[in-house]
Image (spheres, rainbow, N blue to C red):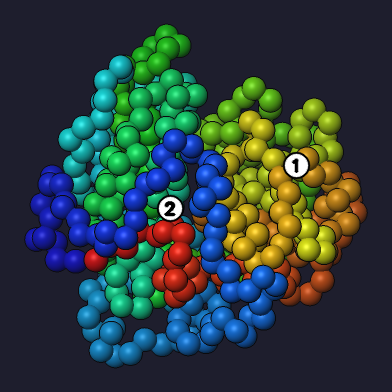
């Protein structure tokens, strides 16, 4: 992207394909029955060979090459696209919008990416009054860019903001801000199959407050970074340990919204687990200590035969957008999916286990360790995990038809 195209403080007018609307704004996390997914490749499980994975670069075939003429048309940042990890790569622009307590957000603007100034008594710093979201942009084979369900993130931020006593951008403001930020940083969107542009919206109490109270001012900010795989294993089985003493969330708390404090609370157990060689931690409910909740930053799914089970959303588990999408994809592929209490005993007896999240997409679990007992789930990637990963990522990257209108295309 030519740096002269956007001044340091100017709002972009974006060009998008008018291929989607927002029919489900009434409910942040539930689709009407008329929106049942129609991504079916067949009523039964489909062999991966039928998905034509080798035709183009993709998460399952990153070594495929682009044509010289295509590569020349892209104005990409000069970084090693083949070696992207999941870390911060500073980009060109960030988006900022402010409002006072009791007011509404308006007149957001793009600014050069960089440090921000906060009063030492800002609500976010003193009382943790803040939320964040996470979503991704993918580059298609034709060079256009796809966002995946950005309005769902906007809806979830509104729910979290209400819980944290903060004003929130409207869904339309949220989506437009995401579009503007992505287009301003379009040279940082990886080539097809090389990764994605991770988009991090923040909502925080930025005004000064000394006594415990909502902040007098709020800032909505978006920054982006090109990323590769979240886990160092990539699309390979990860090893989890079940934590039965420390807990991520409690009933009546904030586990069901994406507030920043939820993530600081898992750092101790996660750090200890990684020091022992595990990929991450799986948490149990804090009341019975026997029902699955979620991994540090992912939802969990358990497969037994044709049944896929995942913990129900009951206030202590984040309603993941990838989780929601995978449930619909799985049902479209002929699986039975249940959202309910899932015991640790069922986990240990499963045929297959996998995690879902924006960062990881779908991550197969190779082993679970619980109270010193290690249970493995076979060698390599499970058939169900790979099937669902393939169907979802092909849709996200524009390699298959988006019959649910889940993607937003930017040009």
In the picture, which quadrant includes the N terminus? bottom left
In the picture, which quadrant includes the C terminus? bottom left
Q: Which residue is mark 1?
A: 340
Circle 1 sits in a helix, a strand or a loop, which is it? strand
In this rendering, position of residue 114 left or right of residue 61: left
In three-dimensional space, the C-alpha distance between marks 1 and 2, rounded to whole angstroms, equals 25 Å
Query: In this view, which residue lies farthest toward the front?
Result: 34
Using the image, tell me which numbered label, if any, was put on residue 392.
Answer: none
Residue 179 picture location, percent across and down: 28, 53
In this rendering, position of residue 305 left or right of residue 187: right
Would residue 206 be seen by someone viewing this image from the given angle?
no
**Mark 2 residue crowding within 10 angstroms, few (<14) / some (14–19) / many (20+):** many
Q: Which residue is mark 2?
A: 149
Of residues 128 and 167, the one drawn nearer to the viewer in this rendering: 167
Q: Contact (CB < 8 A) between labels 1 and 2? A: no
Circle 2 sits in a helix, a strand or a loop, which is it? loop
> Would you identify the image quadrant in which residue 291 lies?
top right
């Amino acid at each position: 992207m030519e740096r002269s195209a956007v001044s340091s403080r100017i709002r972009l007018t974006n060009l998008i394909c008018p291929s989607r609307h927002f029919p489900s704004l009434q409910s942040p996390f539930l689709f009407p029955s008329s929106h049942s997914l129609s991504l079916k490749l067949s009523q039964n499980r489909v062999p991966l060979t039928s998905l034509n994975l080798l035709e183009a670069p993709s998460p399952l075939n990153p070594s495929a090459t682009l044509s010289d003429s295509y590569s020349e048309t892209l104005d990409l940042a000069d970084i090693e696209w083949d070696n992207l990890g999941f870390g911060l790569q500073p980009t060109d622009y960030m988006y900022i919008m402010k409002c006072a307590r009791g007011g509404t957000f308006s007149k957001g603007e793009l600014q050069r990416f960089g440090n921000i100034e906060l009063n030492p008594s800002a609500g976010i710093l003193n009382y943790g009054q803040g939320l964040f979201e996470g979503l991704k942009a993918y580059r298609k084979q034709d060079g256009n860019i796809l966002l995946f369900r950005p309005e769902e993130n906007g809806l979830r931020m509104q729910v979290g903001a209400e819980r944290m006593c903060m004003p929130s951008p409207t869904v339309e403001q949220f989506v437009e801000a995401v579009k503007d930020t992505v287009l301003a940083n379009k040279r940082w969107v990886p080539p097809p199959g090389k990764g994605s542009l991770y988009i991090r919206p923040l909502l925080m109490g930025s005004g000064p407050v000394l006594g415990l109270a909502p902040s007098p001012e709020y800032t909505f900010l978006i920054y982006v970074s090109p990323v590769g795989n979240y886990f160092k294993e990539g699309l390979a089985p990860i090893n989890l340990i079940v934590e039965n003493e420390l807990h991520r969330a409690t009933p009546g708390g904030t586990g069901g919204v994406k507030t920043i404090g939820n993530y600081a609370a898992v750092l101790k157990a996660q750090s200890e687990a990684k020091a022992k060689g595990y990929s991450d931690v799986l948490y149990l409910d804090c009341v019975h200590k026997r029902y699955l909740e979620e991994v540090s930053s992912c939802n969990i799914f358990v497969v037994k035969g044709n049944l896929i089970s995942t913990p129900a959303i009951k206030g202590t588990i984040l309603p993941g957008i990838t989780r929601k999408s995978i449930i619909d994809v799985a049902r479209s592929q002929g699986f039975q999916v249940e959202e309910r209490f899932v015991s640790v005993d069922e986990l240990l007896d499963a045929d297959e286990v996998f995690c879902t999240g924006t960062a990881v997409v779908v991550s197969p679990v190779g082993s679970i360790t619980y109270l010193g007992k290690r249970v493995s789930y076979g060698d390599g990637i499970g058939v169900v995990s790979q099937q669902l990963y393939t169907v979802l990522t092909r849709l996200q990257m524009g390699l298959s038809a988006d019959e649910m209108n889940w993607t937003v295309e930017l040009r």
